[in-house]
Image (cartoon, grey):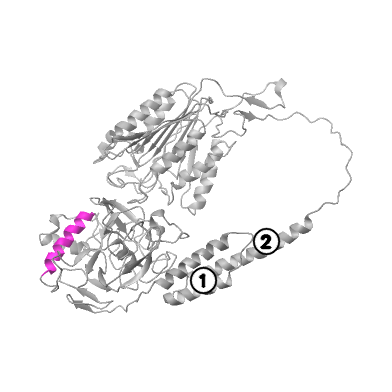
């Protein structure tokens, strides 16, 4: 599973826990991973027949008078089984996902540790999903404990929820029910087993790839009725959308894994704890929600270590208290030590807050790289002491050292942006804006220089594929498209007989000066081929036998041009701000709705528009999960997974963290969507 993703697409997780009690028969895990073609790649089984499974208590009958005031221990019932079905789908041909397989594996491990026999499937086709559900149903029976967990794409159509296999080819509303798995079928399978408690959990991530294609589809998942003895938990309110998360697991599953490991916590309290955690981490942008008709209790992990759950009844009146003789008062006290420690801790806490404020001020400094290095020197000298009550000071010093080194290495010249547009051909100075032909896009000459590529370890929202940070030196100037290629420029290619006659849809947002969308990497290469043919007679330079000067940017060239001499998260600073770009919560009129006309926001110091947000841009590089062995001379990576290509810059429906200069994404070379376009590069001779 790659750590990049084309988009944090809709991932639905369905969990059903059918609880009567449990049996200490141990746990087994049977994961099976299927490749993109649906063939099984791996099948492993982990057996632990000797593990002890704690009892789960559903409820206790009213006590008799003889039992009043005593604890009643309810032991597990023999013959009961705990069965789990775990499915994680990520490798979709359209909009592959980041976290479902990670989520499914983590859940399978957690359930196995809690005594479940686990049937696991990864990247399952429709046939494999149906077979897994059938196998799961065969293992269930009266008195069994059943759990189903699904992570992957899902959708609602006319109020019904469907789980999407990796081989689904959904071309119309009528094909949804035929080529997906109806979530109600899973619930029906379990209720038919005459179980006493059902728990259904639906975790819906944003950006369903089929949303808005058909009349009956909608965002998020639909509300499902909870039959008697059932609790249905949603990652967010029905009809709303949820976050896929920026770490190893989705946000909702991340909090669920933590909460369900808490001993002695009822399932209702587990979901309450999950709701608090998700709301906190999402700044209240996502609020989980439940509908319940439970009539009994269920514990993921019982509250005592003996494998039983204890229910306490009201105690009888206490007998008369016999007060023993009182001891003499001793002379031991630690009050003075506590006062000293408290005073010292308070002073260091104030010192730490001052260090953080100084760090933020240094990070906000916008001077020349040499001046930035001086600022970090002063910070390190002022806060050289070790805080004995915290490790935060060490982390800040390490980050300051890294930023100082970056500032010392970067030697960029920020050009003055001219207003005139020059004719094409010949050598150009940095900052020159030119056009090679009437139908050619405007280009901006970018200077040679060096920069630190990637993100530092403390950067918020950082992904592992953004490291290791490394120096890249661009040995000579090159030109970058002033904006992304527009519909008007693409349509000129089609009118002239180029671009293979392909005319992409604009979704009704308009063509003209809006960035072209619904183009894949191969389409971008067709446009470049046409453009090089147009300028070959105009640009009087030697191309060394090549096809022409125009090309896609390399990944390092794109980040270099996006940073434009800055070291902050975005070229304008470390905060997304308001009205600087088009994204979710960027503060523009187009946020999370559609593309904006190119040039709607301020240019960066190189004179380039929309390097952050609006549309992703294809770049030349083959996809690699890290920068290990990456070129350091500004050239494109030609080794790796070349069936997938790198995407940069993020889009109108990405969160602010994805707009960072260092953020990386990827997609199949033949993949198209309404948030993907491209920007030109041009070799200078």
Q: Are marks 2 and 1 in contact (CB under 8 Å)?
A: no
Q: Residues within 10 Å of mark 1 (few under 14, many from 20)?
A: few
In the rendering, which numbered label is found on residue 361? 1
Q: Nearer the viewer, residue 13 or 6?
A: 6
Name the one closer to the observer, 554 or 177. Answer: 554
Q: Provide residue 32's location: percent of width, then percent of height.
A: 36, 34
Confirm whether residue 202 shows in the render: no
Sooner in the amino-acid sequence: mark 2 or mark 1: 2
Disc 2 element: helix
Q: Residue at x 35, y 55 (%)?
A: 653
Q: Quadrant of the N terminus?
A: top left
Specify whether residue 251 is in view. yes
Residue 513 disc label:
none
Magenta region? 520-536
Magenta residues: mostly which secondary structure? helix
Magenta stretch holds residue 529: yes
Query: Considering only vertical position in the picture, is 38 above or below 454?
Result: above
Disc 2 designates what residue? 345
Q: Residue at x 30, y 73 (%)?
A: 448
* Cα–Cα span, label 2 and label 1: 24 Å
Taking 421 as reference, is 154 left or right? right
Give the vertical position of 120 relative to 512 (above or below): above
Image position, residue 492 (x, y; %): 15, 63
């Amino acid at each position: 599973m790659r750590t990049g993703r084309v988009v944090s697409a809709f991932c639905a997780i369905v969990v059903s826990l059918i609880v009567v009690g449990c049996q200490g028969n141990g746990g087994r895990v049977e994961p099976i991973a299927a490749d993109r073609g649906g063939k099984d790649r791996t099948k492993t089984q982990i057996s632990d027949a000797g593990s002890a499974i704690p009892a789960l208590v559903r409820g206790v009958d009213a006590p008799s008078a003889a039992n009043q005031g005593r604890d009643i221990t309810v032991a597990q019932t023999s013959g009961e089984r705990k069965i789990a079905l775990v499915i994680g789908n990520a490798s979709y041909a359209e909009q592959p996902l980041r976290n479902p397989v990670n989520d499914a594996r983590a859940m399978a491990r957690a359930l196995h540790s809690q005594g479940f026999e686990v049937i696991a499937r990864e990247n399952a086709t429709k046939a494999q999903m149906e077979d897994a559900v059938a196998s799961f149903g065969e293992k269930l029976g009266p008195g069994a404990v059943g759990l189903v967990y699904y992570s992957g794409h899902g959708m609602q159509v006319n109020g019904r929820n469907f789980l999407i296999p990796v081989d689904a080819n959904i071309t119309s509303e009528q094909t949804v029910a035929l080529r997906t798995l109806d979530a109600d079928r899973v619930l029906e399978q379990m209720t038919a087993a005459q179980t006493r408690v059902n728990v259904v959990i639906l975790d819906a991530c944003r950006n369903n790839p089929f949303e808005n294609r058909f009349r009956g589809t909608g965002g998020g998942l639909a509300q499902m009725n909870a039959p008697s003895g059932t609790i249905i938990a949603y990652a967010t309110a029905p009809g709303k959308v949820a976050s896929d998360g920026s770490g190893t697991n989705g946000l909702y599953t991340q909090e669920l894994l933590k909460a369900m490991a808490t001993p002695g916590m009822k399932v209702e309290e587990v979901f309450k704890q999950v709701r608090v955690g998700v709301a906190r981490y999402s700044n209240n942008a996502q609020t989980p929600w439940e509908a319940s008709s439970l009539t009994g209790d269920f514990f993921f992990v019982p509250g005592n270590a003996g494998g039983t759950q204890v229910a306490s009844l009201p105690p009888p009146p206490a007998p008369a208290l016999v007060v023993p003789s009182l001891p003499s008062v001793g002379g031991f006290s630690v009050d003075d030590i506590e006062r000293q420690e408290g005073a010292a801790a308070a002073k260091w806490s104030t010192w730490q807050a001052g260090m953080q404020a100084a760090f933020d001020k240094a990070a906000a400094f916008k001077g020349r790289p040499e001046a930035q290095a001086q600022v970090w020197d002063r910070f390190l000298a002022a806060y050289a002491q070790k805080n004995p009550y915290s490790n935060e000071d060490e982390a800040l010093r390490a980050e300051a050292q890294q930023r100082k080194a970056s500032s010392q290495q970067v030697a960029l010249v920020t050009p003055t942006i001219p207003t005139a547009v020059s004719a094409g051909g010949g050598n150009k100075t940095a900052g020159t804006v030119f056009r090679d032909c009437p139908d050619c896009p405007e280009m901006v000459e970018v200077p040679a220089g060096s920069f630190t590529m990637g993100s530092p370890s403390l950067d918020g929202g950082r992904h592992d594929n953004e490291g290791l940070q490394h120096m890249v030196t661009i040995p000579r100037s090159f030109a970058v498209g002033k904006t992304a290629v527009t519909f008007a420029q693409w349509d000129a290619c089609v009118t002239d007989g180029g671009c293979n006659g392909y005319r992409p849809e604009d979704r009704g947002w308009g063509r003209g000066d809006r960035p072209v969308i619904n183009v894949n990497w191969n389409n971008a290469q067709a446009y470049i081929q046409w453009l090089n043919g147009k300028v070959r007679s105009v640009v009087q330079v030697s191309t060394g036998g090549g096809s022409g000067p125009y090309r896609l940017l390399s990944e390092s060239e794109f980040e270099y041009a996006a940073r434009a001499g800055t070291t902050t998260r975005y070229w304008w600073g470390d905060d997304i701000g308001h009205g600087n770009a088009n994204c979710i919560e960027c503060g523009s009129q187009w946020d999370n709705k559609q593309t904006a006309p190119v040039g709607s926001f301020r240019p960066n110091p190189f004179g380039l528009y929309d390097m952050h947000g609006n549309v992703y841009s294809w770049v030349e590089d083959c996809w690699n999960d890290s920068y290990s062995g990456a070129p350091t001379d500004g050239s494109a990576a030609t080794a790796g997974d070349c069936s997938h290509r790198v995407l940069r810059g993020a889009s109108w429906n990405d969160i602010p963290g994805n707009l960072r200069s260092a953020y990386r994404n990827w997609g199949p070379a033949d993949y198209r969507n309404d948030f993907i376009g491209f920007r030109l590069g041009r070799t200078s001779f």
